[in-house]
Image: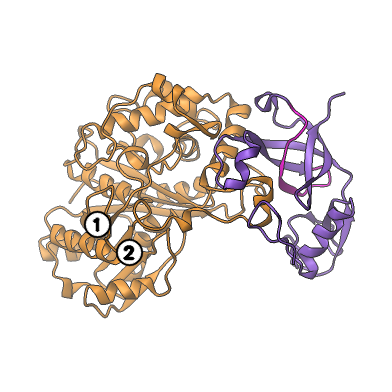
Chain colours: A purple, B orange
Amino acid sequence: MTQTASMDVRLPTDPLDGAYWQALAEGSHTFQRCQNCGNAWLPPRHECPRCLASAWAWEKASGEARLISWVVFHTAFHPALAARLPYAVAVVELVEGPRLISNIVGVDDLESLRIDQPLRLRIERESDVALPRYEPVTD
Amino acid sequence: MRGKYVIAGVGHTTFGAHEGRTTISMNVEAIRNALADANVEKGAVDALFVKFPTSQFDFIYAHKVAEAIGLQPRVCSVMDQAGAGNASMISFAAMAIDAGLCEIAVVSFADNPKTGSRAGLRKPMGTNELFGWGGPVGGYAMIARRHMEEFGTTSDQLGAVAVAARGFAVDNPNAQLRKPLTLEAHRESKMIVAPLRRDDCCLVSDGGAAVVVMSATRARALGVAAPVPILGFGQGHTAWSVEQRTDLTSTMAVRSAQTAYEMAGLTPADIDVAQFYDCFTIVPIITLEDYGFCERGRGGDFVASEGIGIDGKLPMNTSGGLIAETGMPGMQLVIEGVRQMRGTASTQVPGAQTCVVSNQGGVMQTHSTLILGERL
């Protein structure tokens, strides 16, 4: 079991969640797709939350996404986060459908973001963990 | 069920800091006060519903409270709906009485997050903490941001909720924050998780509160002094976490309110006063929309322009709510609703005959509604 250097969070090593984080470490952001109804989801689950089937497969995300909402932390709720302040946490929706909590990076003014704006995946290493983060698409 | 059951008595501890008090002790004091208010002997109580202390989960906690008050109730349970729990337990108490399981129920809550443990408020979020995601403020800030961006809601409109709450608390001797707040002060208060400032956040408080529920018939037979009828109740559970729900700016509060209005035979236009759960200022703004007091997205306009003060279109949180009276999760709102319906509130809405109360929790995952009527 890997313990991340800065936080108390332990990366899961079970076959389900462990596979998600292992794929990120290898440079792929993945999600699950139901082999019964086609639903796509995150975070990893053993059953499809729409049709409840257990038959699913991993699929690699395209990296295209949009910003549903974001907040900017000005207070560190964990001492290890003090050096990151201020930082943006966002709800991000992949073009394939699944939503996740992530960070928005590569922006100078965190208050200048706009809901529904397009984002692109940027996998970054924080301590020894590969995190799926997003940056605004600026073209 | 309309008007068939009543809140016969209410009681609470002082609000604020209770250094060294256990949550059991505060539950007992609140129950003692509620029984005295209802003029009911302890031995007549045959049901106990308890919301467990948020700051520390404890198995069969309701039974430990029952032991502390020397009861062996016919019905006894903790129910977990986070901040919606108290209003829901009052409705479940009415249903249990209606089903013949019991006759007189006590619903109680106490917690000591101010002087005791805050472990339960930290809300560990697993690997999402790697993104710096944690604490109770972030989720509500995420909802507030979407609301502001989608509908043009402003920080000043959020501030108007806090200013109104503090305005009522000035006149409430039970309130913890009795200094008035200005919009200017709200603008200058520390940004915690943007767009939410410190003055958008509720208090963290110790205290206990309890109510006694029985049938209107029983209340008359016992000569209860000021029973307040429960005209309607409802629930709705959005359930999904903030990042999973497809709509961040409306919740199952819509269904909760519709169910309660239907039971009560009332519409929003019939409501004289509201007690809306205000753990963060964005919540009552969305509740005004979800409950039909204004159109979707116009909750900010409503609080800033139509008004939620004593002279406003809908006087709201007339004891100061979670923001200014005490940070307790919801029971103080029910108790203020009862006071308004008895005509004994510290800021009484003249002639008020109906009061709607919302309780909600998680990050708007759970929701429960009570509609109270004028005292019998």
Residue A101 picture location, percent across and down = 69, 46
Tell whether label 2 touches label 1 (CB within 8 Å).
no
Residue B321 picture location, percent across and down = 34, 40
Q: CA distance from mark 1 to mark 2?
A: 10 Å
| Magenta-drawn stretch contains B336 | no
Secondary structure beneath disc 2?
helix
Give the residue type that dot 1 points to. Answer: Ile
Q: Quadrant of residue B58?
A: bottom left
Give the residue type that dot 2 points to. Answer: Ala
Residue B3 picture location, percent across and down = 28, 55
Chain letter of the residue beneath label 2 in the structure image:
B
Q: Earlier in the sequence, mark 1 or mark 2?
A: 1
Q: Is residue B41 above or below residue B145?
A: below
Q: Is residue B28 above or below residue B309?
A: below
Please tell me if label 1 and label 2 are on a single chain. yes
* Residue stretch in magenta: A94-107
Side (left or right) of B341 relative to A34 = left
Question: Mark 2: few, some, or many residues within 10 Å (few <14, many ≥20)?
Answer: many
Say which residue label 1 marks: B7
Residue at 21% across, 45% down: B339
Tag on residue B94? 2
Side (left or right) of B268 relative to B193 = left
* Quadrant showing the N terminus of chain B: bottom left
